[in-house]
Amino acid sequence: MRSPTETAASCESEPIHIPGGIQPHGWLIAFTASGRVTHVSANVSALGGLHPGEAIGKTLAEMLPAEARSLAAGSLGLLEWARRGTGGFVRQVRITGQWCQCFAHRVGDQLILEIEPETRPGVFGAAGMADTLQADVLDFSREAEDLGAWQDVVHLATRTARRLSGFDRVLIYRFDSAWNGCVVAEDGNGKLPSLLGRHFPASDIPAQAREMYRRNRLRLIQDAGYTPVAIVPACGPDSDSPLDLRQAVLRSVSPLHLQYMRNMGTMASMSASLIVDGQLWGLVAFHSRDPHFPTLPVRSAVDFLAHMLSGGIAARANAERAQQLLVTQAHHDRLLAAMAAASPPRPEVLADEVGDLLALTGAEGAAIVTETDCLSVGQTPDEASIRRIAAWLAAEGYPTQISAGVFVTDNLAAVWPEGARLVARASGVLAVSISELHPSFVMWFRPEVVQTLDWAGEPEHKSADAAGRIWPRDSFALWRQTVHRTALSWAPYQQEAARRLRQAIVGVVMRRAEELAGVNRELVRTNTELEAFSYSISHDLRAPFRHIVGYAELLREHLGTGYAEPGRRYLQTIVDSALSAGQLVDDLLAFSRLGRTALAYHRVNMHKLVEETQRSLELEAAGRRVAWRIGTLPPAWGDPAMLRQVLLNLLSNALKYSRGRDPAEISVFGEVVAGGHRYTVQDNGAGFDMAYAGKLFGVFQRLHLSEQYEGTGIGLALVRRIVERHSGRVEAFGEVGVGARFTFVLPEPDSRSQR
Amino acid sequence: MTELRPILLVEDSPRDLELTLEALKKTQLANEIVVARDGVEALDFLYSRGGFAGRNLPDPAVIMLDLKLPRIDGLEVLERVKNDAALRHLPVVMLTSSREERDLVRSYQLGVNAFVVKPVSFKEFYQAIQELGIFWAILNEPPPASGVGADA
């Protein structure tokens, strides 16, 4: 869609608040707090006989005709009065036989006095007229109370407004978010064509005009055929800028606007602003084919009606917003509950809550893109495209185009050309970032909705005069535009819902991170306690065992040979028990130390390590026939000291449990397997029942009586702990009376970072 | 040097003390054994103060120092000895129940001469004490008395 806002750009720069003139049906005098006149309208001589040049610098009293001097006498009081408010009707005075209405308002340190004579009989309103008008407005107010939707209220308002104003046609014109206008209600007598449903480009009412409308609520042009009257002097007296006439009742509109009116075939127009929550919501626009002179009470009534209508619209908008928030909150709560219930809480689970996720923003599809996942629900582009959108958002879209934490577009292709091929599912995109660290987003999608816009005339059509000056378009005939690639707009409350969901997600995830940090602190504390505990065990538990052994030995020496069995055996048992208890303490400490020692990874020659370990066991194997078969072993990636422990335990086990064999056969070999290197230690010893294989690696788990095979029951637990700390796995196979086979796999560092 | 240097044994546990003394007795060393029951007493002996004021014995041939001691512990005694130019040449052997790695590391950082984990087995314990006694009290040749401590 081509933007109509580019049209008539010359209008945007026109300084309309300082048109330098007034409409000709009245006089304007500006003066300072000291009562000195600074500006007058060029037609001022008709008022008091002084020419404009003579009037400047005089006091108000000096330049006004005798019968209007009372105004001057109260000029300081007027100034004081104007200071309190925005100004308005002051009083009615009689000047040169004519009744005149006086209006005053303040601009800076100046007071602007406007005097409008009753040039046409009845313009000031007949007796009782104000009461009738007031009754009309009150009727409107009462009837409107029964109407629920603002659409109905504005229709009612057009009927009331036309009846009390006498204009040929009354429109209610509403601005959209891009300040294009649309006629949402109309009432007319048929003299002027209907414009109901027509759109007007934002350039028709440029930004500076909208700002003026926000401050000055009622404007009137009685006869578009007028010739403006200049203000004298054009600038000054103390500054280079012309007098600010934004709030002047008689303000002359720009020539462009007069041309616009003539092009529309309306010679009189009036407009009242509809202000909702401080923003210009729309206008009540009055038009007549011929010049029209609404009376003063009519103007007041229209002002009052517009004011009441604004309030009515605001109340309904607030109620609607409250209802939307209520519904949105319910979706939000359910989504959040689902996420918090997951352990750990993660945004991916939102994809399971399809209904709530889509209803939250009124989307047709949604996607959750995280560092690892891309989950989509409803009508969405394919995964690759979603990831492309996410990548673009992360790199460009999100940083440059978010407002209040939300990326929002009705026309993705307009901001990202690649989006053109996704219009069927993702013309509209609403996205929020949910991670500070990774490009992670929750996105909602809306499909293209081909819309037909009825413009009041082709919005980009301009005509230029001979001097090249651009004039407003001269045709307001229906001009139908088909809008492609655009989705229905995301409503502000839907954008807000997305933003709130983002906050909640980030909050939950952050809280989770804090909880983890808390757990971590607790672990560190527990670990410190455990270390202190094992330290004191190593000191204090070992010492008594040493003392038992020592004193038992001393006792044996003391007794010499002069004592017999069973005393000798008792003493030996005391020594053996204390020794094995001491060994147990040492083994347990070694086991617990394993958990805290950092692994020092090296390339380990396993063949050499096996041979060294075998040699260290020679003493244990003394006097036995042991057939060692050591095959080829691939090098391992691990901590050499710990791997030595593994081999020592497995080899000494093999030696121990093959005690009854002659010869004992012990094989050690290795091979390359998927995921790493596998090492095997196999013996032909006592073996074990596979039913108990799972118990083999537990601390203190034994499958044999200790008088058969000595040991503390920690060796294999140690083996498993070491292998698992290397991210490997250990397995045991056995058969009673046949033998046992232990294997462990150590992963190779290929997939991880190679040192 | 004519005078036989004593062995300074610093040990708080009466049982360990008795067992160690038994072990040393078996070694049949001629050296006198001086016993200190905590770090304070050990330092008193080394600085000839407190109960050891005006001692007539020379500096010890070796200090056998338990790690965990009341008042001033073994590591601190070690630190003070090794930081004092007049004492740092004295051999210090840590005797401890603990296999704790950080104690080992700390001891070597402070300049210990040997670190011995007391074996549970009395036979091994006896052998260890005997070897320590023979090595430090008999075999080891201390630096000459003159000039010691000047190389600070």
Image (spheres, rainbow, N blue to C red):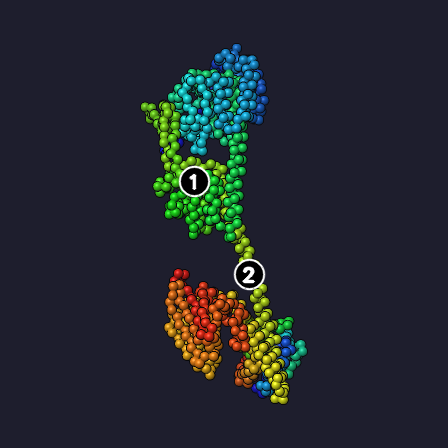
As shown in the figure, which amino acid type bears the numbered disc 2?
Val
Mark 2 belongs to chain: A
Considering the numbered disc 2 on the image, is that residue within a helix, a strand or a loop?
helix
Picture coordinates of residue A504 (x, y %)? Answer: 51, 46
Cβ–Cβ under 8 Å for marks 1 and 2: no
Crowd tier of the residue under label 2, counting other residues whose Cα lies within 10 Å: few below 14, some 14–19, many 20 or above: few
**Residue A45 can be seen, yes or no:** yes
Mark 1 belongs to chain: A
In the rendered image of this protein, does residue A632 appear above or below residue A253?
Answer: below
User: Which quarter shows the C terminus of chain A?
Assistant: bottom left
Q: Residue A524 — which label? A: 2
Going 43% across and 36% down the picture, which residue do you hit? A489
**Residue A66 can be seen, yes or no:** no
Picture coordinates of residue B75 (x, y %)? Answer: 58, 72
Q: Residue A364 — which label? A: 1
Instruction: Judge left or right: residue A61 versus residue A439.
Output: right
Going 48% across and 37% down the picture, which residue do you hit? A492
Going 39% across and 19% down the picture, which residue do you hit? A265
> Camera-side residue: A566 or A272?
A566
> Camera-side residue: A305 or A327?
A327
In the rendered image of this protein, does residue A604 appear above or below residue A445?
Answer: below
Considering the numbered disc 1 on the image, is that residue within a helix, a strand or a loop?
loop
As shown in the figure, which amino acid type bears the numbered disc 1?
Glu
Marks 1/2: CA distance?
Answer: 48 Å
Of all residues shown, which one is farthest toward the top?
A: A97
Picture coordinates of residue A414 (x, y %)? Answer: 37, 38
> Camera-side residue: A29 or A754?
A754
Are discs 1 and 2 both within one chain?
yes
Instruction: Judge left or right: residue A295 versus residue A484.
Output: right
